[in-house]
Image (cartoon, rainbow, N blue to C red):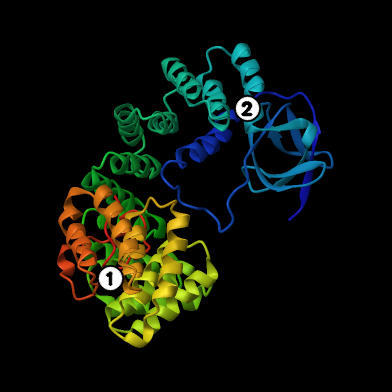
Amino acid sequence: MKTYKMTLKTIRLRRLGHYFAFGGLIAAGILANALPTSAAPPQEPVVARVEMKLTDGEKVTDVIEKGDLLTVIEERDEDYVILTHDGSRGAVDKVNAVRLAESTDIYTDLIEQHPDEGRFLTLRASAWWALGKTEKAVEDFDQAIELGYKEPHAFSSRGLFHAAIGNFDKAIADYNMAIELDPESIAPFVNRAAVHMAQGKVEKAIEDYTAALKIKPANASLLRQRAIALKAAGKLDRAIEDFNGILAGNEKDVDAISGRGYIYFQQGNHEAAVKDFAKVIELNPESAVAFNNRGYNQYQLGNAADALADYDKAIELAPQYGLALQNRAWLLATAEDTSLRDAAKAIESAKAACEISDYNNLGDLSALAAAFAADGKFEEAIGWQEKVVENAPESYQEFAKKILQRYQDKKPFTANLDEDEVASGNDPSNDDVATATTPSAS
């Protein structure tokens, strides 16, 4: 594609609104994990400091105005290669453009020159956002809307800023208005869903993702976000359907395979979980999480040797992976297959996990106590289990005390204890799988 050169000229002001529409969409996507438009993430836009025109010889092919947001596709030593609205490339000298976070003075000048033009205020709001000054961004949007600038993206973007500072009700009101003005735009649906998720209103989030999917059917990002919401709502079969929908379009989508595997784990379908995490490993052999998760599900199927090999590999790939260290410690301390037990290594692994968590994770402390008990060092086991009892949530207290009594009676932990009384150790926001003997620290 031919690259044209920007030359400086004073020209008639036009098309500023078009360029801000692009900027508004950038802002509107931050909270909601916006749908990617390409494999590579876009670079931060730059802002034109002066009025320019794009020329091919004597022919003017495009116009760049002071304050225009420019899409950067390549940064070179002396200039930016930008993409114009019609798909042409242009080279802009760096002296004639600044990064968005450095552009507030440009927009302040334009606001002073055009005090009745609300769109210049929305452009400056994007610059405040880039600087992390969210409240100033909200103030500019308030003023712009008061001046009559009521484009859908103005409400959607202001809603984003309100959400960022915790004004959820105001954010919802803005997203509602954006949807009313442009019901075919997915951004306000997705951003409103994110606010609903933050408020724990999972069913409302699901409704919004579903509405967005009616506009963009089978969109992988939307299906992924709805699957997460469905999982949070406990609607695991429907979440699997969404992951299957993603995989129908791309059978090598690692995140979808891993997400589905985690749900199979939650359902107790360990065989299916093993297959999914094995597929993740095939596609991404450096995934320590996949090895850990396959290992846990292998253990649940009675394949302790395979589980240990997976934990070892996870730790080899990520030596500071606390959950894998904890899982390995439990296996080495409590495996029914005595040939796999190694109390000394269990203590070593549990200590490593505890050091990573600064001795604040109850699962790590429980594993360390169990490892000492397996090694016959019951005084140490009692000491660490007492810390577990001291800090355990009420729902785990009774069981933690039963374990403590075992150590006081000089009996090691055994996998044959009443596991129904044991809470899962994994955080529901984290798709790492913990051992069934790990107490919940949340």
- What amino acid is labelled 1 in the image? Tyr
Q: Which residue is mark 2?
A: 14
Please name the residue shown 72% across and 27% down the image: 49
- How many angstroms separate mark 1 from mark 2 (CA)? 55 Å
Q: 289 above or below 7?
A: below
Question: How far across and how far down the image is residue 279, in percent?
Answer: 42, 77
Residue 208 visible in the current orientation:
yes
Which residue appears farthest toward the right when viewing the image? 57
- In the picture shown, does residue 379 fall above or below 139? below
170 or 294: nearer the viewer: 294
> Residue 238 at what x, y percent from top left?
23, 63
Residue in the picture at 28% in, 52% down: 210
Residue 11 picture quarter: top right
Q: Amino acid at mark 2?
A: Arg
Q: Is residue 108 left or right of residue 81?
A: left
Please tell me which residue is depicted at 31% across the width and 86% down the height of the picture. Answer: 337
Q: Secondary structure at mark 1?
A: helix
Judging depth in this view, the residue of 197 and 69 nearest the camera is 197
Up-down relation of residue 111 to residue 406 (above or below): above
Give residue 233's position: percent from left, percent from top. 22, 53
Q: Residue 211 in the image: x percent, y percent?
A: 28, 48
In the depicted structure, whether residue 415 falls above or below residue 401:
below
Do the residues bearing badges 1 and 2 touch, measured as CB atoms within 8 Å? no
Residue under pointer 1: 264
